[in-house]
Image (tube, rainbow, N blue to C red):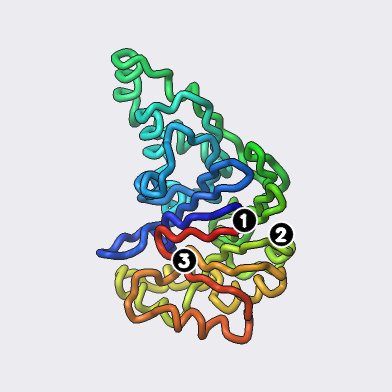
Amino acid sequence: MASVTILGAKGGPALRKDGAMPTSLLVQMGGAQIVVDCGLGVTRGLVQAGVDLRGLSQIVITHLHSDHVLELGPLVHTAWTTGLRTPLHIWGPPGLRAYWDGFMASMAFDCDLRVTDEGRPPLDDLVRLHVLDEGAFTLGPVHARALRVPHPPVTDCFALRLDADGKSLCLSADTAYFPPLADLAQGADVLLHEAMLPQGIEAIIAKTGMGDKLRAHLTGSHSTADQAAQIATQAGVGHLVFYHIIPADDPAFGLTDWQAAISGHWDGPFTLAHDGLTVEF
């Protein structure tokens, strides 16, 4: 049995009372545990999911927007202070090295002190950074493929397909409608696809106090629910799950709105993600 746990279901970096956390996932398949994206709250989410942080070995960052990478450094540091002593592989787009070097510089006092005072191995010696690009790679026993998807103005954003032991999972990352994604997801057991309700955009604009630029970003860089449903149908996947939900924390919109949006575009199993949800496949 394989599974994916939604540690953070919302799209975007803002937090609101009783709302969902930003994007992060725990994938368990082929005997491996893989963290995909590290939005705010990922560390607590992993611990609440029963993960022993000392065993972290594989992390993938799909792109460098803050709601996908903000807590990468704190997660790795917390794993280290919990007792991590084995190599940790982190995959991410160009720019990941700059992020990591900046984080280590910001924590130099603490890291140096814990090595000399507590006898820990140097944190930087445990971390192995890998540049993510299109094509095949491996995450321990899991075969992975990455596909660059359109998420302007970000140029390096990658959808992923993960396969192990006859199980398959595809996740869209952040993307505008992109038909080639259906080829990557072809026949997958589960497709996690970001999704947006167009009727919720103006409420987001009002809450954030932003204007035309944010509206243009949302409409030009993300997929509407019906577009995501079309990808699932084209790919012939077994189960469609919406994550990176926009909006995720507006009580004016609920499950029935999402179901209405995909009606006529997808007629298979459908799940709207929430924090802590585990989907087995």
Residue holding disc 2: 184
For this rendering, which residue is in front, 280 or 267? 280
The correct choice, above or below, for 15 with respect to 56 in the image is below
| Residue beneath the point at 50% across and 25% down | 86
Residue 273: assigned label: 3
How much space separates mark 1 and mark 2, taking CA atoms?
8 Å
Give the x, y percent position of residue 139: 63, 40
How much space separates mark 1 and mark 3, taking CA atoms?
18 Å
Question: Does the CB distance between marks 1 and 2 fall below 8 Å?
Answer: yes
User: Amino acid under label 2?
Assistant: Leu
For this rendering, which residue is in front, 280 or 74? 280
The correct choice, above or below, for 134 with respect to 232 in the image is above
Give the x, y percent position of residue 204: 36, 73
Residue 159: assigned label: 1
Picture quadrant where residue 15 is located: bottom left
Tell me the quarter of the image containing the C terminus: bottom right
